[in-house]
Image (tube, rainbow, N blue to C red):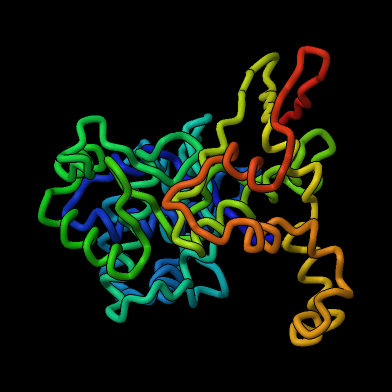
């Protein structure tokens, strides 16, 4: 399972004139955190190396971040390791409560199609800031006061604490690099390291990670085919300290198309992709793999799609009677 990190939505409260780089640096520090202690131990040299950013820039970023108590509650500075050859800061990360989103750690090393590394890092920082104001459990930002049916850039700049000039510059770079797509009244983050909803633990006995895996297959099939993906729209109930979820449409889709990306990867490892392509009829399992089925069923690609649309395309009965029990799972 790919490593992931939770990021506080307070990331948009970062101050300073290099906010985009600061946001990415904070996310990397958070990614190195021990979730049992909420402490991150990392050197500034490591951060500079991993983000391919000059050390002096990282030192300046860290100096600013240490003062932001919404993000870092305390810093123990210059603890010595390796016989004095290296020093690191011990960052006590401020707890997020429920106010966070998920990213995959691949964000830090991913090539996002921007040659200038400083611009690439700033676009990644912009994605982190925009995600903090997206609709809950989506990668969509929708303006509350759209401008002529499109995104209100001034409104977005105010929400994430950037000046209009900076936002416009890096938003255009992000769009050109296919990291962001403009949609009606807003935008959609396309970067696959920014998780649209959440990540579920594989070892959980009470959750239903298969539903999330199937939703992600649908979601990224949409992104690959230049379709605005559906919102997940779980019904969420909090009771006795637990979060209960139900999603009738997703449970019906997952019940019929339950083959995951991991299952397909096992097939590829065993037989090889070329053999599978040449002998497709020998692998009926593919008929339960939803991206494969969607490619066959939805030949005329719409601009936008919903789970209701998908159930119809897959001939799944989405009706729900009072005699049925809609499955509930917990996180």
The residue positioned 69% from the left and 22% from the top of the image is: 242
- Would residue 150 be found to the left or right of residue 65 on screen? left
Residue 124 location in percent, x, y? 36, 61
Q: In the depicted view, which residue is nearer to us: 127 or 269?
A: 269
Residue 328 location in percent, x, y? 76, 25
Residue 109 location in percent, x, y? 48, 72
Q: In the depicted view, which residue is nearer to us: 47 or 144?
A: 144
Residue 18 versus residue 313 in the image, above or below: below
Q: In the depicted view, which residue is nearer to us: 205 or 293?
A: 293
Residue 252 location in percent, x, y? 75, 37
Residue 90 versus residue 156 in the image, above or below: below
Residue 261 versus residue 55 in the image, above or below: above
- Would residue 195 be found to the left or right of residue 258 on screen? left
Q: Quadrant of the C terminus?
A: top right
- Would residue 15 be found to the left or right of residue 258 on screen? left
The residue positioned 56% from the left and 32% from the top of the image is: 233
Residue 67 in sight here:
no
The residue positioned 27% from the left and 40% from the top of the image is: 185
């Amino acid at each position: 399972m790919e490593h992931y990190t939770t990021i506080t939505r307070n990331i948009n409260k970062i101050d300073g004139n290099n906010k985009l780089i600061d946001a990415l640096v904070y996310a990397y520090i958070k990614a190195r955190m021990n979730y049992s202690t909420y402490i991150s131990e990392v050197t500034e040299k490591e951060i500079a190396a991993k983000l391919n950013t000059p050390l002096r820039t990282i030192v300046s970023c860290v100096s600013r971040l240490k003062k932001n108590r919404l993000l870092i509650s305390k810093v123990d500075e210059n603890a010595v390791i390796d016989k004095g050859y290296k020093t690191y800061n011990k960052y006590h990360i401020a707890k997020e409560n429920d106010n966070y989103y998920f990213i995959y750690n691949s964000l830090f090393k991913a090539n996002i199609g921007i040659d200038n590394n400083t611009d690439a890092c700033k676009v990644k920082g912009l994605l982190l800031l925009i995600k903090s104001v997206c609709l809950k459990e989506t990668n969509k930002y929708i303006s509350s006061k759209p401008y002529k049916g499109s995104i209100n850039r001034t409104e977005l700049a105010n929400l994430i604490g950037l000046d209009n000039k900076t936002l416009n510059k890096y938003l255009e770079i992000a769009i050109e690099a296919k990291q962001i797509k403009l949609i009606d009244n807003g935008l959609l983050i396309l970067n696959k390291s920014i998780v649209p909803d959440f990540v579920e633990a594989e070892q959980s006995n009470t959750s239903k990670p298969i539903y999330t895996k199937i939703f992600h297959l649908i979601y990224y099939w949409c992104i690959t085919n230049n379709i605005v993906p559906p919102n997940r729209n779980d019904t969420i109930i909090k009771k006795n300290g637990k979060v209960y979820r139900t999603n009738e449409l997703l449970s019906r889709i997952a019940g019929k198309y339950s083959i995951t990306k991991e299952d397909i990867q096992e097939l590829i490892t065993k037989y090889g992709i070329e053999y599978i392509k040449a002998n497709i009829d020998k692998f009926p399992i593919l008929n339960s793999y939803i991206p494969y089925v969607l490619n066959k069923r939805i030949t005329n690609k719409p601009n936008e799609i919903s789970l209701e649309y998908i159930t119809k395309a897959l001939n799944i009965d989405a009706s729900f009677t009072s005699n049925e029990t809609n499955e509930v799972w917990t996180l």
